[in-house]
Image: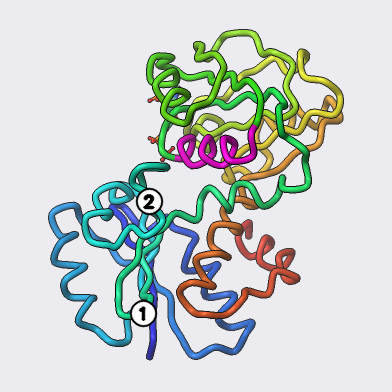
Amino acid sequence: MKYAEVIGDPISHSKSPLIHGFWLKALGLDGEYCATHVTPEGLADYFATRAADPDWLGCNITIPHKETALAFVEDRGGVKQSIGAINLAFRSEGALVGTNTDAAGFYAPISGLDLAGQPVVVIGAGGAARAILFALSRVGVGRVTLLNRNPLKGAALLASFGLKGDALKLDAPLPPAALLVNATSLGMAGQPPLDLDLSPLPDDAVVYDIVYAPLETGLLKAARARDLDTVDGLEMLIGQAALAFELLFGAEPPRERDDELRALLTS
Ligand code: ATR
């Protein structure tokens, strides 16, 4: 049977098998999606073995392989130079192609906003922040205030995406902004909270948290208390998976059943 999988180290926490399994079943497709533990030392062997397996459709790639996996794929979209990390390898016309669906998955739920020239705030400067800043740079946002534990890392990131703005420490006061995104793990169960004073944000600002466990983070609670529009972390998780599903299995996932999928992911 044709199959795809998600690889990482560790991997048991991954929600990807639940998401892709839900869509495969919903569409009645003959295929499987599993989680496979692959260590950094085992990565080269993994790709060599799978390349010889005609049933393998490709894999999602998660921590810590998102950058190193670039060495085993064709980078047709120039992802190495832009986001610098891939989250998907899929077969296309006899080649194994690498791509990154995080940026588009992040952007899909806010694609209705007119962010051109608008000031935005991004918290974080890790891998997720890279995909998010890439997406924001493509829509031509205005000044970006990037808050991070290490502001130097934030400044380097802004420069690498050609974004104008300021890189500041996490406790810096927020500027007014049309969109605020948490791209760190702060607020996730077991992690310290993200304590921000949202009062400088205008009433029509949107607050987007990529953390999905818990789904209602302290940040989203604070945003709702101010009556701001919010986007939760399952949106990006499901969005990046939807694009990957199409590239792996060649079928559009049934997004009209997102409510059921969200219930499954939070049960
Ligand atoms: P991901 O791929 O999920 O983005 P990552 O690349 O490890 O993961 O990035 C995690 C982000 O969360 C980083 O911005 C990190 O801050 P640093 O760049 O200063 O390392 C931030 N982060 C994680 N734990 C944190 C903590 N306890 N306090 C402040 N920032 C934290």
- Check disc 2: other Cα within 10 Å, few if <14, some if 14-19, many if 20+: few
> Which amino acid lies under the numbered mark 1 shown in the image of this protein?
Glu
- Image quarter in which the C terminus is found: bottom right
Name which residue lies at 48% across and 72% down. 247
Q: Is residue 48 left or right of residue 156?
A: left
How crowded pointer 1 is (Cα within 10 Å; few <14, some 14-19, many 20+) is rated as few
In this orientation, which residue lies closer to the viewer: 58 or 95?
95
The segment highlighted magenta reads: 128-140
Q: Quadrant of ligand 1?
A: top left
The overriding secondary structure of the stretch rendered in magenta is helix
Residue at (76, 33) in percent of width and height: 206
Q: Of 166 and 230, which appears nearest the observer?
A: 166
Label 2 amino acid?
A: Gly
In the rendered image, residue 40, in percent from the top left (x then y), is placed at 18, 52
The numbered mark at residue 78 is: 2
Q: Is residue 55 magenta?
A: no
The image shows residue 78, relative to residue 193, as above or below, that is below
Which residue is nearer to you in this view: 143 or 28? Answer: 143
Q: Locate the N terminus by quadrant.
A: bottom left
Q: Horizontal and vertical percent for residue 61?
A: 36, 58
Q: Is residue 246 left or right of residue 11?
A: right
Q: Earlier in the sequence, mark 2 or mark 1?
A: 2
Q: Which mark is residue 234?
A: none
Compared with 219, 99 (above or below) is below
Q: Is residue 89 left or right of residue 106?
A: left
Work out whether residue 170 or residue 218 is closer to the camera in this orientation and state it: 170
User: For the residues marked 2 and 1, what is the alpha-carbon distance in whole angstroms?
Assistant: 18 Å
Give the residue drawn at x 41%, y 42%. Answer: 82
> Which disc, if any, is residue 93?
1
Secondary structure of residue under mark 1: loop
